Amino acid sequence: MKIFLRILAGLGILVALLIVYITLNGNKKFDAPYPNITASKDSAIIARGRYLAFGPMHCASCHTPMANMAEIDAGKEMPMLGGWEISIPPGTFRARNLTPDMETGIGKLSDKEIARTLRYGVGSDGRLIFPFMPFKDVSDDDLTALISFLRSQEPTKNEIAPSEYTFLGKFLMTIEALKPDGPAVTPPISVLRDSTAEYGKYLAYNVTNCRGCHTPRNIKTGEFTGPDFSGGFVIPPGKHSNDYAFVTPNLTTDVETGVMAEWSEQAFINRMRGGRVHKSSPMPWGSISRMDDSDLKAIYRYLHSLEPIKNKIDKIVFEPGEELPS
Ligand code: HEC
Ligand code: HEC
């Protein structure tokens, strides 16, 4: 009995040490190279950045106060004062103020720090930026345009509380199941804009994140667990969705289970412009509705060039409190 108690006490001390270790290590700093990006004052470049930020790159869908979502959905350009918040098992994450205000915005961040956050997921203070912003493979020209636009905005004060990792998040960082993820190959300097499937692939993967939401994933680590665009990613409920949860539809050409397999190009464009049907859907409908015909055609042509993948999604929208598929 005494030996048993001693073993138990020993185990207790080990667990306590592990908890202390994870808690301390959870504020881990990471390093990554600074991309060679410098903002420009050229009005054509700023205009391209504005289109990206309010359209395909949908910064506005997260970096605008949640109270302004109706305006964003209606296609208006609201100031990017931050405010979207999501609580998931690894932590609570809050999108910051992206106006150039010195104290509460991006005024003090350099162009290269912002570029590094978007390309490598490492914050200006070296912390891991949780992978909500899948822009690591965006071209140098598009990053330059985007940051040039961010700099051109009116600086506005709006304090956003910092993001917080939970114990689980810190644990995942300690074992490196969660770590910054940079581009696998050097991103392009420039990509030719056209309505081709090739440009559509660039948009669907690198810019608009259709793939990131419409592919099965592990919500704890963000890891992809099934074929691209086959749907079935479970997006948990939270403040950002008025406690509704969603499972994403299959976008491949399988006629039985793919939602857009039988849509014409024009039907797709109309649907993307048609906006939100499910009130609290996390899909950035407002931003996507601002995309021009050429960009939408390109995405359609790319998705319609994919192999059909059978993946039946039984249910898309889940009421607050309703049990989710695992
Ligand atoms: C899906 C929602 C979402 C989208 C889209 C999004 N962001 Fe973010 N952003 C966040 C969240 C959440 C954080 C806080 C993450 C954290 O603290 O780990 C953040 C943090 C940031 C930061 C802070 C980095 C730091 O050092 O603190 C910058 C800069 C940023 N975003 C820029 C952008 C830009 C530019 C775009 C558009 C290209 C964009 N974001 C699109 C959700 C989003
Ligand atoms: C942040 C996650 C997210 C992103 C990014 C996203 N979607 Fe979705 N999408 C969803 C969810 C959730 C639904 C189901 C609820 C709804 O229809 O709003 C959906 C629904 C759809 C539908 C079905 C609409 C209908 O009426 O049946 C299509 C088509 C679609 N998305 C295409 C796209 C394309 C193309 C992109 C990239 C340009 C994209 N999505 C980006 C989450 C996302």
Image: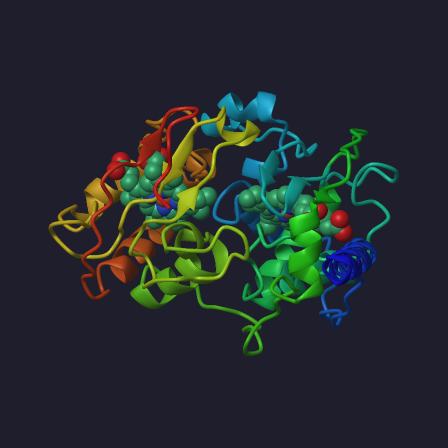
**Residue 127 vertical position relative to residue 190 in the rendered view, above or below:** above
Q: In terms of image quadrants, where is residue 143?
A: bottom right
Question: Could you tell me if residue 270 is visible in this image?
Answer: no
Residue in front for this viewpoint, 61 or 197: 61
Residue in front for this viewpoint, 261 or 256: 256
Most distant residue in the front direction: 1
How far across and how far down the image is residue 200, in percent? Answer: 36, 60
**Residue 33 vertical position relative to residue 53 in the rendered view, above or below:** below
Colour scheme shown: rainbow
Ligand 2, image quadrant it occupies: top left
Most distant residue in the bottom direction: 185
Q: In terms of image quadrants, where is residue 186?
A: bottom right
**Residue 47 vertical position relative to residue 180 in the rendered view, above or below:** above
Give the residue displayed 16% in from the left and 46% down from the top: 263
Give the residue displayed 88% in from the left and 38% down from the top: 103
Question: Could you tell me if residue 17 is visible in this image?
Answer: yes
Tell whether 114 sits left or right of 137: right
Tell whether 265 sits left or right of 5: left
How far across and how far down the image is residue 276, in percent? Answer: 37, 29
Tell whether 123 sits left or right of 256: right
Q: In terms of image quadrants, where is residue 61?
A: top right
How many tags in the picture? 0
Question: In which quadrant will I find the N terminus?
Answer: bottom right
Residue in front for this viewpoint, 65 or 229: 229
How far across and how far down the image is residue 261, in percent? Answer: 17, 51
